Image (cartoon, rainbow, N blue to C red):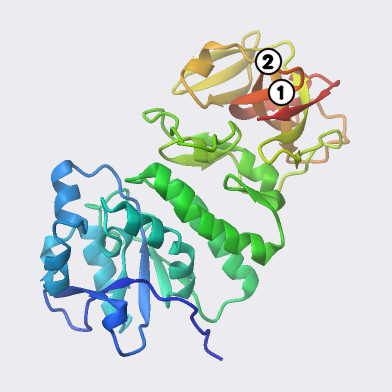
Amino acid sequence: MRYRRQVVPKRVIFVGTDHSDQLQLQESAHITQPIDYITLSHCWGNPTDEEMEQFRTTPRNYQKRLEGFSYHSLPKVFQDAITVTRELNKQYLWIDALCIIQDDQKDWEEEGARMDKVFASAYCTIASSSASGWNDGFLNRTQDFSQSEGVSSDQKIINDFYLITDYSRRDLTFPKKDKVVAFSGIAERIKNALSTEVRYGVFRCFLPRLLLWKRAGMENDRISYDDDRVPSWSWMLYNGKIDFLTKSYLQVPRNQSLSFDNSGRGINIEVQQFEGCYTRERDGGHIIFSGAEEVGFLYFDMDSAAEVEPRNCVVIGVDQDDGNNDLNKEYYVLAVRKLSGEEEYERLGVGRVQARYVSKGSSSGKLL
């Protein structure tokens, strides 16, 4: 039985099925036939002010978009998405930059909160992972299609997980609105599907792996949230792209008590110490040395954090049995710093280090 959609986007782009130059932004309320649409997941990159004004839908060009606009007026990644949509014999395409009115806070808050349902209800999602910005096309390269129909519920959950990581890697025009509003809807859907808990973009069932994020660049600072301060352990605290140290399964050490606390902001942790090692900067990261030997590495969240020689760490995971006595095994760790409270810590960065350079003993604390 065909999946019955619960929601359609407020607007879609009518692309037709031929290779016409003419496109039209249409309001779904005025479309009488069923809307079978495709979505595009893409990286915004670093568009110029002129490109932002030309390519996005704004209150200034909204009426003209409803009247019609040219295929050749769009950047390459949008053109490729239109080509794919037509090749799949679909007439409608949804692209956030075109179908959500940019520079309109009310429209962004309303439509941004529905983005998870927009992606979930699509015929398929084109993930232009090979394109780093609007002017990069993705045809003639590998394209990834996330089909909404004919897949198991487990596959849909996996697709949703990678949709989140995809969004975290995008250069977002409104990082505060985008990460809080758009992710809240996606997070709620996955939370219900997995019967898990989510806080600040981190799911309890994926807790170790999702704590092992690192910033892909240091050009952007923390996001200044108006009210609810995001904790240091969440990737949502920063504007810009992130990567994860690993997406593989990790064993949590036996002494580690990783769990959300009752405050809504903290994570229960066991704090250990780096021993017999020091860090030195190299190639954008920091190498952990013991004498002249390289024994690990760290990526700091902020340049200022790199000025602090980390003493405390939290062992998040190990890729082999933590019960064996191999001191050369590698720990995945967070570098942390003590706050004013006796048991309160904040995150400084993330990395890997050989087990012999982490203390055996630990003390309980909270990561905020």
* Amino acid type at mark 2: Ser
Position of residue 75 measured from the top left corner of the image (x, y, whole percent): 19, 57
Position of residue 13 measured from the top left corner of the image (x, y, whole percent): 25, 73
At x 46%, y 47%, the residue is: 179
Answer above or below: position of 81 versus 287. below
Query: Quarter of the image containing the C terminus?
Result: top right
At x 48%, y 16%, the residue is: 304
Secondary structure at badge 1 equals strand
Crowd rating for badge 2 (residues with CA inside 10 Å; few <14, some 14–19, many 20+): few
Secondary structure at badge 2 equals loop
At x 52%, y 88%, the residue is: 2
Answer above or below: position of 185 versus 242. below
Answer yes or no: do the residues labelled 2 and 1 have beta carbons within 8 Å? Answer: yes
* Amino acid type at mark 1: Glu
Question: 285 or 334: nearer the eye?
Answer: 334
Residue under label 1:
344
Residue 289's image quarter? top right
Residue under label 2:
340
Position of residue 1 measured from the top left corner of the image (x, y, whole percent): 56, 91
